[in-house]
Amino acid sequence: MKHILTILFIALSATSCISKNTDYNDAVATINISDLQTYVSVLGADSFLGRKPFTAGETITVNYLADQLKRIGYEPAFNGRYFQEVPMVEISSVSGEVTISGSGKKLFTLNTPDEAAIISPQVTKRIDIENSELIFAGFGIIAPEYNWNDYEGLDVKGKTVVVLINDPGLYSGDSTLFKGREMTYYGRWTYKYEEAARQGATGIIIIHETEGAGYQYTIPRKSALSPRLYMQQADSNSSMCAFTGWFSASSAENIFAGLNLKVHELRLQACKKDFSGFPMNMEICLSLNNEIKYNKSINVAGILRGSKRPDECIVYTAHWDHFGIGEKENGDSIYNGAVDNGTSMAWELEIGEAFSELKTRPERSVMLLFPTSEEQGLNGSLFYTDNPAFLMEKTVACINNDLMLPIGRMKDVMITGFGQSELDDLVVKAASAQDRYVVKDPNSHTGMYFRSDHFAFARKGVPSLFARGNIESREFGKVWTAQKEKDYIDNKYHRPSDNYNAPEWDLEGIAEDAKLSFMIGFELANMKEFPAWNPGSEFRNIRK
């Protein structure tokens, strides 16, 4: 009898394991190309009007996402609603010519936005800048941990600082300077604007350079033409600089030539610790008219409650917003954002549906979050992490994606922010199951870890993952893949040409990435431990 009971127990255990594996495999099998095509073709359609916040396109988009969350079995995340209101202010800045003078003479007249892309973040109807002294402040960085202070010895209060994009490590060739070619947050334009304001500057202008920015000058140029969104602040953004912006590379070359300086040589000099900024003996004049609009945009989210620890959650994110209807290119004015970020929304919905198909619910809750206003500075995700549906200390991890190229299956899984946390180990495990290898983002100098919604969670101490196939096509190799990415960035990124193109698109790679991210989330949702930040991560002490 004892022997028979033992055999019976083993048989039942085996049946249980098979059932569990079948349940899991059936869930994974729900992730398919047909669903991805449906989602992207809808979200990237002209009828969605470019999915811009504060427009009819927003209403269409958030209602569609809420309907999909309800359809796949996710309950509303915000007190019975799928919608979280995000108070923001929209500012449309219109500027005329920018003039640069010196020694009482007009030296340069710059056309906006072609030569200087200038906006104002302050909630005021008019900005007039008369003869504001220009100060060159290197990279515009104060980083005590790197023993670096570009503002040392400079008085910039009430003046305009001119700074370089990115970090000195990118241009120096020194892998020990900052993080070498990998951008730190100090290299982001958002930080440079923040630091200039802390130093009391009236304005800040960044010198554009394509490698350091990660995009061509057309991007800040278009941003200056488009309304900007900011979180509503009690001080009406008066703590920010009165104006911010960019010089095109050619404009900067002309201006510094007036000082007998070449920008590329100045950039190399500014990479040295003993470099000091200097007054440029020039003044800037400009005027801005701001059209101001207060409104609320919407974060969309749904929850699949966990079976054992429903107060702990895994969050998947993909922003829903794009640029709406804007400047025409080749007769097209709708910025559909099919890749940015239609493909990632489809990725997220497919993962969410796979979880909902499980007969045995995961132990932890799973949340699908679609933040607003990522394109304008992560406004939606920053608001959510300040006002979360789950406490940040109960949020186990964030798995985010953005701009997933529909170019087929990849041999690699590229991690942006590689080395930050133990989530990398789970990626390695899942990638191995798909016969793929893990690689660090080779373009870490563009600062993508700070440019998408996972960063809002990281800054709150939540280990956050941004991973997708992006380096080596299984069919065509690395060179072909790099060419495809470059073509997208140069010709479609933030342009009306980012359209859904069924004949040319291959969504098999995005389906494979969705399965990989489901595997990782499934493990996180059922393990007892919380993943940790790695030693050396700047976010480690926040979680502690």
Image (tube, grey):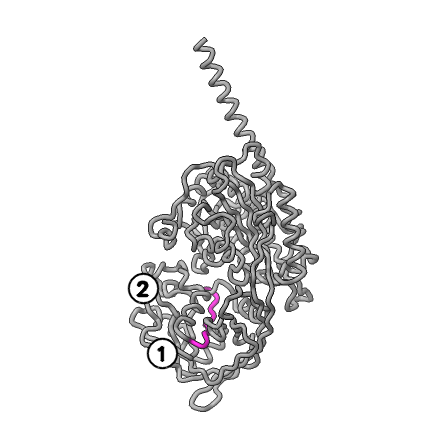
Gap between marks 2 and 1, in whole Å? 19 Å
Q: Secondary structure at mark 2?
A: helix
Is residue 347 visible in this depiction of the protein?
no
Badge number at residue 504: none
Q: Residue 285, how many percent across, how many down?
A: 50, 83
Q: Name the image quarter holding the N terminus.
A: top left
Residue at the spot of label 1: 155
The image shows a total of numbered marks equal to 2
The magenta segment is 201-212
Q: Which residue does the image show at 49% across and 75% down from the upper left?
A: 242
In the image, residue 280 sits, relative to residue 347, either above or below, namely below
Residue at the spot of label 2: 144
Out of 348 and 513, give the one closest to the viewer: 348
In the image, residue 416 sits, relative to residue 256, either above or below, namely above
Q: Residue 467, how many percent across, how many down?
A: 48, 48
Out of 160 and 58, give the one closest to the viewer: 58
